[in-house]
Image (cartoon, helix red, strand yellow):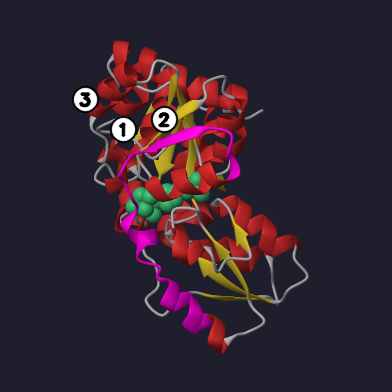
Amino acid sequence: MDCIAKEIQKLKKEKDIAVLAHYYVRDEVQKVADYTGDSYYLSKIATSLPHKTILFCGVKFMGESAKILNPEKKVLMANDAADCPMAHMVDLEEIATIRTQFKDVAVVCYINSTAEVKAHSDVCVTSSNAVQIVKNLPQKTIYFIPDENLGRHVAAQVPEKHFIFGSGYCHVHADISRKSIEEAKAQSPSAKVLAHPECKAETLELADFIGSTSGILNYATESPAREFIIGTETGTRYELERMNPGKTFFFTDQPPVCPGMKSVTLDSLLDAMKNQESPVEIEPELQTNACQALSRMLELAK
Ligand code: 13P
Ligand code: SF4
């Protein structure tokens, strides 16, 4: 273990900090984390930790969600500037308009959204629980924000409901083109294609499996196949290879890289631990309102 990683391990114990990391962050950051996972797992585990402080290696909405669910804890970001552009692709006025137009509407927000958006929503979802939650909502009309690609993927599996979609998207996943998957498949014809539902529908059509980052990891681990083409961010390679020695994972020619996730480094993590300068703060009324949507997700996803 190098010096900086050793210092991080020492400070975790001294300062009673739990380090949580998403699968998209750099390998060396995942290596020093106490818990790694997809957005759903990380939001859930954050509610059951005894530590005084949670340090999030991921993008802003993840740290915000941890703070909303655990207002009594100190929540730090390993890099305050790490953000997800899609989280901001919601027009709050549009939510109000839809609510007046459709009396029986459920506003369903993807966890990749700001605290304000969550506060205006009925329930939050992640890519690993969206279908289950939407199916079980009493409302027949669903306003799904912000990710249109995930919304359409969910809608296809819940044909009994009427969907209205936001127009947000993840530029990292939207850039995984159908052509790039076809090219990867031409080079490795027996490889299974595993893709994240933030990809466009035309790309998802080529997938053998569509799921969250944890879903992709579980599928690859349980599958008898030996080769996989991965339609999500390259950070997943670390856990895919760690869990599956002997299996081969290919990414598209222009590998999908999330700048926000990759802006978290061991140096920024160590700085955040030492200085603890700008913990995540959510104003009490916003916290209470946003917490309803997140708590409902945890309840309905059980
Ligand atoms: P997961 O919930 O699958 O981890 O996805 C989070 C994300 O940001 C995907 O781009
Ligand atoms: Fe946001 Fe896309 Fe990065 Fe996920 S991969 S955090 S959706 S920009």
The vertical placement of 195 against 192, above or below, is: above
Q: Earlier in the sequence, mark 3 or mark 1?
A: 3
| Residue 67 seen in the current view | yes
| Residue 250 picture location, percent across and down | 54, 77
| Residue 254 picture location, percent across and down | 37, 76
> Dot 3 lies on which element?
helix
24 left or right of 131 in image: left
The vertical placement of 280 against 158, above or below, is: above
Q: Nearer the viewer, mark 1 or mark 2?
A: 1
- Residue count near mark 2 (Cα–Cα under 10 Å), binned few <14, some 14–19, many ≥20: many
> Looking at this view, is 13 or 110 the one in front?
110
* Mark linked to residue 79: none
Q: Which residues are magenta?
A: 157-184
Q: Residue at x 60, y 51 (%)?
A: 214
The CA span between labels 3 and 1 is 15 Å
- Residue type (three-letter) at the residue carrying disc 3: Glu
- Residue type (three-letter) at the residue carrying disc 2: Ser
284 left or right of 110 in image: left
Q: Earlier in the sequence, mark 1 or mark 2?
A: 2
Q: Nearer the viewer, mark 3 or mark 1?
A: 3
Q: Of all residues shown, which one is farthest toward the bottom?
A: 187
Magenta stretch: includes residue 177: yes
* Mark linked to residue 93: 3
Residue occupied by mark 1:
114
Q: Looking at the image, do the residues carrying marks 3 and 1 touch, with CB atoms under 8 Å apart?
A: no
- Residue count near mark 1 (Cα–Cα under 10 Å), binned few <14, some 14–19, many ≥20: many
* Mark linked to residue 65: 2
